[in-house]
Image: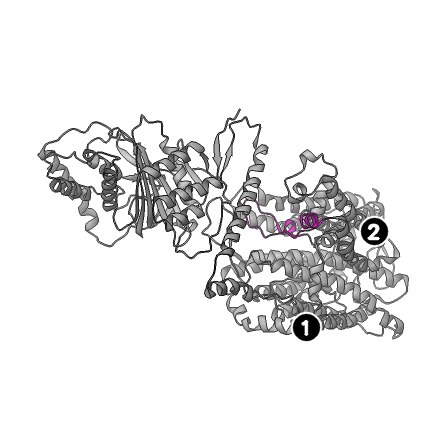
């Protein structure tokens, strides 16, 4: 049973003030008065705040996990009462801890919080040594942490003579908690001599600082630059009769050596001492003021406060944004989910009120100009200029002046590491799609053509493109279209490659017209509704195609042995299975394998496919585990596909007596099927009799291909260019679209596949080049510091992919079943980032088990299910089109979902419902522990 009566203070308590101030980020350290193992009093660090609270675990003396502070309501009220009656010193001009302590004690006496005879004891308490959990880990330092008491001795002597009091002062080595006994002059002199000896050590090397330990350097990385510290000192002492408090703001931040665990200049001090018999909980009050000082709004108010009342008003404002949980029994954490959501709504309303108040205040011309400046600087690359090719010209003017810096910025180790990773990320799909494309086109376009096309188009795009972070590659939608067009050509007895040449010519014409009229702005109409249907369809095709291929293998290879008929050099011969490998390896000409009935082939293919899928899948999931450091987990997860391919190829290679169909890759720089085609495709056909009407009719399939390339490229550019990624060099929608389509259209003349901006590979590329800020509070989300925007990584990746043609012998060892496993993996992983998938699963769940998403909370369940059903109907229509002879027209049917959403759905659903169900809320995530991969970051097909 859990009985709670606390104030829950959310970490999202952020109200940004618009006035100008020199407020710095605050590092807060809570120190409590404790007894060490030598029975001496000391200030022991028990908690700290960079943004969230971290507590020292008593048993292990190590730091616990960061968490949002939960404060008792009573401690906040007692803190408010203490500040209203205690000593408040604002803009105190002191540079040392003894000087600060002297002023604090004097103010406590003036405000009648302590008696004059307690001056020495309070001073001695304030100047006790400070201990930290990291002290035992550090090596012994030439500068001990305990503060020299000589300064204290001089202060005591000064007050003694100034007040003409002949009562001897207690020694600084007297017990703090006990009764103060008078001591003789000899004892005092001896003690002061000890103090002088202690002071000699630091004065021997003036201006010299001790070197920072590993712990300090690591912690300093988490603290924002130019941060200032708040020292909170709380504890109970026997010599006081009532609690005494002081709040201090220094005129200038100063470093107080050995007080904090890291050398951060101190701006604020809070002191609370009192008798142990009082009902006041010093620890909770210390946590309360520490949490207040770590809060952005309160510490800004503390910086700007002119008197005590300003501090009290800031506490009242803090309480207004806090939530009290009643002391009722809690059944589990699930019941607390609504707390953060409730406070976000409360903060949002308060922020709106602040904005309204500020808007009513009269502003000077300079303030108005400052408010308008950000909107003037924002340059929307999709905004139409109204001039022919105006968008293209703006892209060139925006991006090309930074061309030289695109090469200088690549001189970084992170860029070189990204090249290796992205090379495998680009090569794996090239091999997979190449092998499957070779299967679907009967070898007319295969791995060789896809590798060459990826390399050539990638190099040219990286040299001339406006957004070189995009990775140009083949994708699932293009594969589906190639299969549909190949089947169409076979049915109508037309040459497939020649038809592609004319499609390429029409592609160039279409893209020139589109760019001339600045048609890229149309991508804004392709909302999440259409993207998710598109992505789900492609994922479904991937998954179904995998099992169809596997079923065909089981049909062709029943569990019985047979002979293999292989036509070699135009002659027919029958050889045994054992001699097959020898014949194939010694044949200089490509051979067509006619294999059937080989035992165990189907079972081994199933093992290879399933093994590849599960290895890649679980290595990707490994990124979310708790094993190994985050960077190592990320590397293992990102290289999951190459690792899966390598392991399964070795498994297949180790099994000598079972046949599996391999990837067909010719040796050297050669097309996949040299007997069927060459590197140049004649526009008139192989026999010069390509139908003239078909030359003009190819404009229709060209329009369909353009729709696919347009959607993939422009939506990928939108995802990469999100403002959360903090790209500074800009993008060029018009220029990039023109380059990609013209390169693809021209490549058709050489029998090469056309390309698009590959979404997953492009986002992976940007993530690999993203530099995260190290000054992130423990427990806080990582923040992007910058992205290495340059052309070199994409250029090197394209060159290395092209050079992979020389490893044809290794590629030819990859079984097709392994590629089917990667195909299945891409289909399953693509479903992760699709909201449609989640809402389809919600159709089968009772409402009480629905997750806490915006579209679940703000849309009625039946209305949400209606939206899902409409998407499913559109998906069914698309699947039906794909299954008929009209499969070539599926891009056109897909684009019809845009007017469905614009005209039909707006009549059925309200604006608020559409904003929740069709919102584009995908943001980049870089949490090392919860590594949401690139597949779950978007809702576009691979």
**Relative horizontal placement of residue 884, taking residue 736 as reference (left or right):** right
x then y, percent, for residue 189: 11, 38
Q: Is residue 53 above or below residue 482?
A: above
Residue shown at 84% from the left, 43% from the top: 560
Q: Secondary structure at mark 2?
A: helix
At x 50%, y 34%, the residue is 324
Query: Colour scheme of this structure image?
Result: one colour
Q: Which residue is mark 2?
A: 877
Judging depth in this view, the residue of 551 and 895 nearest the camera is 895
Residue 678 vertical placement versus 862 (above, below): below
Foreground: disc 2 or disc 1: 1
User: In the rendered image, which quarter contains the C terminus?
Assistant: bottom right
**In contact (CB < 8 Å): disc 2 and disc 1:** no
Above or below 802: residue 360: above
Q: Residue 803, position in %: x, y? A: 64, 65
The label number, if any, that marks residue 386 in the structure image: 1
Magenta stretch encompasses residue 825: no
Q: Position of residue 571 (x, y in %)?
A: 87, 62
- Magenta: predominant secondary structure element? loop
- Kindly state the secondary structure of the residue where label 1 is placed: loop
Identify the magenta region: 910-938
Q: Is residue 808 visible?
A: no
Give neighbour class at mark 1: few <14, some 14-19, many 20+ (Cα, 10 Å): few
Q: Say which quarter of the image contains residue 128.
A: top left
201 or 922: nearer the eye? 922
First in residue order: circle 2 vs circle 1: 1
Q: Which mark is residue 873?
A: none
Q: How many marks?
A: 2
Q: Is residue 721 among what the camera can see?
A: yes
Q: Would you call the spot at circle 2 few (<14 residues within 10 Å), some (14-19), or many (20 or more)? A: some
Image coordinates of residue 400 in percent, x first then y, are 58, 73
Alpha-carbon span between mark 2 and mark 1: 37 Å
């Amino acid at each position: 049973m859990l009985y709670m009566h606390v104030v829950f203070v959310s970490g999202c308590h952020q109200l940004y003030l618009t006035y100008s101030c020199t407020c710095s980020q605050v590092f807060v350290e809570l120190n409590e008065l404790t007894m060490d193992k030598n029975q001496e009093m000391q200030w022991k660090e028990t908690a700290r705040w960079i943004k969230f609270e971290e507590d020292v675990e008593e048993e292990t003396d190590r730091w616990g996990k960061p968490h949002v502070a939960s404060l008792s309501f009573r401690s906040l009220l007692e803190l408010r009462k203490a500040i209203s009656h205690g000593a408040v010193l604002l803009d105190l001009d002191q540079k040392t801890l003894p000087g600060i302590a002297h002023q604090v004690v004097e103010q406590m006496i003036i405000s009648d919080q302590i008696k004059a005879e307690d001056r020495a004891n309070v001073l001695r308490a304030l100047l006790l040594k400070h201990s930290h959990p990291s002290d035992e880990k550090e090596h012994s330092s030439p500068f001990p942490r305990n503060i020299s008491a000589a300064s204290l001795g001089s202060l005591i002597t000064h007050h003694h003579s100034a007040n003409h009091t002949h009562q001897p002062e207690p020694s600084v080595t007297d017990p703090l908690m006990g009764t103060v006994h008078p001591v003789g002059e000899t004892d005092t002199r001896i003690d002061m001599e000890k103090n002088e000896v202690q002071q000699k050590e630091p004065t021997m090397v003036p201006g010299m600082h001790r070197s920072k330990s590993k712990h300090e350097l690591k912690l300093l990385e988490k603290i924002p630059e130019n941060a200032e510290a708040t020292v909170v000192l709380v504890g109970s002492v026997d010599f006081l009769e009532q609690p005494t408090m002081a709040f201090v703001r220094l005129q200038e931040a100063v470093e107080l050596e050995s007080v904090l665990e890291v050398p951060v200049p101190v701006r604020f001090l809070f002191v609370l001492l009192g008798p142990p018999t009082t009902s006041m909980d010093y620890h909770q009050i210390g946590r309360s003021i520490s949490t207040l000082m770590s809060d952005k709004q309160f510490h800004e108010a503390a910086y700007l406060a002119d008197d005590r009342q300003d501090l009290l008003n800031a506490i009242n404002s803090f309480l207004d944004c806090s939530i009290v949980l009643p002391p009722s029994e809690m059944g589990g954490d699930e019941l607390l989910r609504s707390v953060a959501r409730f406070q976000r709504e409360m903060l949002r309303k308060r922020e709106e009120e602040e904005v309204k108040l500020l808007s009513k205040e009269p502003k000077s011309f300079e303030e108005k100009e400052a408010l308008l400046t950000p909107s003037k600087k924002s340059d929307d690359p999709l905004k139409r200029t109204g001039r022919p090719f105006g968008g293209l010209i703006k892209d060139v003017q925006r991006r090309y002046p930074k061309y030289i810096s695109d090469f200088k910025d690549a001189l970084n180790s992170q860029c070189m590491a990204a090249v290796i990773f992205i090379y495998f990320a680009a090569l794996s799909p090239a091999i997979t799609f190449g092998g499957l494309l070779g299967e679907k086109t009967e070898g007319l376009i295969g791995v060789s053509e896809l590798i060459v096309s990826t390399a050539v188009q990638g190099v040219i795009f990286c040299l001339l493109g406006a957004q070189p972070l995009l990775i140009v590659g083949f994708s699932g939608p293009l594969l589906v279209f190639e299969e549909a067009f190949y089947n169409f050509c076979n049915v109508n007895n037309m040459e497939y490659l020649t038809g592609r040449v004319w499609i390429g010519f029409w592609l160039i014409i279409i893209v020139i017209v589109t760019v001339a009229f600045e048609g890229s702005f149309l991508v804004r109409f392709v909302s999440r509704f259409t993207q998710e249907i598109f992505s789900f369809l492609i994922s479904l095709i991937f998954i179904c195609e995998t099992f169809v291929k596997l079923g065909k293998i089981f049909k062709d290879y029943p569990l019985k042995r047979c002979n293999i008929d292989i036509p070699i050099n135009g002659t027919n011969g029958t050889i045994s299975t054992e001699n097959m490998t020898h014949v194939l390896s010694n044949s200089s000409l490509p051979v067509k394998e006619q294999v059937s009935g080989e035992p165990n082939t189907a079972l081994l293919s199933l093992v290879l496919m399933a093994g590849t899928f599960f290895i890649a899948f679980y290595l990707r999931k490994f990124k979310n585990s708790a094993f190994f450091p985050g960077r190592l987990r990320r590397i293992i997860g990102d290289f999951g596909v190459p690792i899966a391919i390598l392991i399964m190829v070795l498994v297949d290679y180790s099994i000598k007596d079972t046949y599996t169909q391999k990837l067909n890759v010719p040796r050297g720089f050669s097309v996949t099927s040299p007997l069927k085609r060459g590197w140049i495709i004649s526009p008139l056909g192989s026999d010069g009799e390509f139908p003239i009407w078909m030359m003009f009719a190819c404009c229709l399939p060209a329009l369909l291909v353009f729709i696919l390339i347009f959607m993939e490229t422009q939506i990928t550019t939108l995802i990469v260019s999100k403002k959360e990624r903090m790209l500074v060099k800009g993008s060029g929608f018009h220029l990039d679209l023109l380059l990609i389509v013209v390169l693809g259209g021209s490549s058709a003349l050489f029998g090469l596949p056309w390309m698009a901006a590959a979404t997953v590979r492009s986002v992976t590329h940007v993530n690999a080049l993203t530099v995260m800020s190290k000054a992130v509070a423990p427990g806080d989300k990582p923040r992007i510091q910058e992205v290495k925007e340059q052309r070199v990584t994409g250029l090197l990746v394209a060159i290395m992919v092209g050079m992979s043609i020389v490893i044809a012998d290794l590629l030819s060892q990859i079984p097709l079943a392994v590629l089917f496993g990667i195909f299945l993996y891409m289909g399953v992983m693509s479903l992760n980032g699709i909201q449609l998938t989640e809402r389809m699963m919600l159709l089968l769940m009772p409402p009480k088990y629905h997750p806490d998403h915006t579209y679940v909370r703000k849309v009625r369940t039946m209305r949400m299910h209606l939206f899902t059903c409409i998407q499913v109907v559109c998906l069914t229509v698309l699947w039906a089109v794909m299954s008929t002879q009209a499969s070539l027209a599926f891009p056109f049917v897909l684009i019809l979902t845009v007017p469905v959403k614009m005209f039909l759905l707006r009549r059925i659903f309200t604006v608020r419902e559409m904003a929740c169900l069709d919102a584009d809320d995908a943001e980049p995530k870089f949490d090392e522990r919860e590594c949401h991969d690139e597949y779950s970051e978007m809702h576009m097909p691979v």
